[in-house]
Image (tube, rainbow, N blue to C red):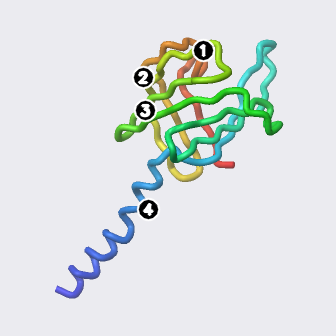
C-alpha cells in the first residue's frame, strides 16, 4: 500500500511538468528567408495571455503581433498587427522543452510556415 501511495504522489507531482511541456508559451528563435532568400533570425515571444509577437532580425523591434488559442495539441494563430495576411492558421504543435514544432493543418496565409508548412523553433 505504501508503494501505491508513493506512486500516486509521484504521478501527481510530475503531471504538471508534462502539461507545461506541451504549452507553446516561451521565447523562441528560428531562421526564415527574407524577400531575397537570405536567412534572417526571427524571435518569437508566445505569451501566456494568448498573444504572440515577432521580431524579425532579432533587433528588439516588434514587427508583427497576433493572438493564439490552444486546444490539446492544436494551436490556432492569427496575426493582428504588422502582417499583410491576417487569416487564421491551424497548426499541430509539439513542445519538448527545447524545441517547439508547429505543423500546418490549414492556413489562410499561404506563406506562413513556408512551403513545407513546418516551423521548428529553438528555445531562446
Residue at 50%, 39% (x, y): give it.
50
Per the model, the C-alpha gap separating discs 1 and 2 is: 14 Å
Q: Mark 2 points at which residue?
A: 105
Residue 87 percent across, percent down from the top left: 50, 15
Residue at 43%, 35% (x, y): give it.
69
Instruction: Decide if residue 30 is on the left or right side of residue 108.
Output: right
Residue 16 percent across, percent down from the top left: 39, 62
Going from N to C along the chain, the mark reached first, 3 or 4, is 4
Per the model, the C-alpha gap separating discs 4 and 2 is: 27 Å
The relative height of residue 80 versus residue 3 in the rendered view (above or below) is above
In this view, which residue lies farthest toward the bottom?
2
Instruction: Name the foreground residue: 41 vs 85.
Output: 85
Quadrant in the picture for residue 32: top right
Quadrant in the picture for residue 122: top right
Residue 110 percent across, percent down from the top left: 55, 12
Q: Is disc 2 in contact with disc 3, using a CB cutoff of under 8 Å?
A: yes
The relative height of residue 25 versus residue 81 in the rendered view (above or below) is below
Per the model, the C-alpha gap separating discs 3 and 1 is: 17 Å
Q: Name the residue under label 3.
A: 92
Image quarter of the N terminus = bottom left
Q: Mark 4 points at which residue?
A: 17
Q: Residues within 10 Å of mark 4 (few under 14, many from 20)?
A: few
Going from N to C along the chain, the mark reached first, 1 or 2, is 2
Going from N to C along the chain, the mark reached first, 3 or 1, is 3
Per the model, the C-alpha gap separating discs 3 and 4 is: 20 Å
Q: Residues within 10 Å of mark 1 (few under 14, many from 20)?
A: few
Q: Name the residue under label 1.
A: 111
Element under disc 4? helix
Going from N to C along the chain, the mark reached first, 2 or 3, is 3
Amino acid at each position: 500500500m505504501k508503494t501505491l501511495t508513493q506512486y500516486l504522489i509521484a504521478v501527481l507531482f510530475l503531471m504538471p511538468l508534462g502539461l507545461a511541456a506541451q504549452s507553446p508559451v516561451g521565447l523562441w528563435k528560428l531562421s526564415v528567408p527574407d524577400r531575397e532568400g537570405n536567412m534572417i533570425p526571427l524571435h518569437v515571444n508566445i505569451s501566456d495571455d494568448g498573444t504572440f509577437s515577432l521580431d524579425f532580425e532579432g533587433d528588439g523591434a516588434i514587427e508583427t503581433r497576433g493572438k493564439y488559442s490552444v486546444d490539446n495539441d492544436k494551436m490556432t494563430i492569427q496575426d493582428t498587427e504588422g502582417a499583410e495576411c491576417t487569416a487564421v492558421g491551424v497548426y499541430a504543435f509539439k513542445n519538448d522543452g527545447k524545441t517547439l514544432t508547429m505543423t500546418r493543418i490549414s492556413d489562410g496565409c499561404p506563406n506562413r510556415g513556408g512551403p513545407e508548412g513546418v516551423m521548428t523553433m529553438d528555445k531562446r
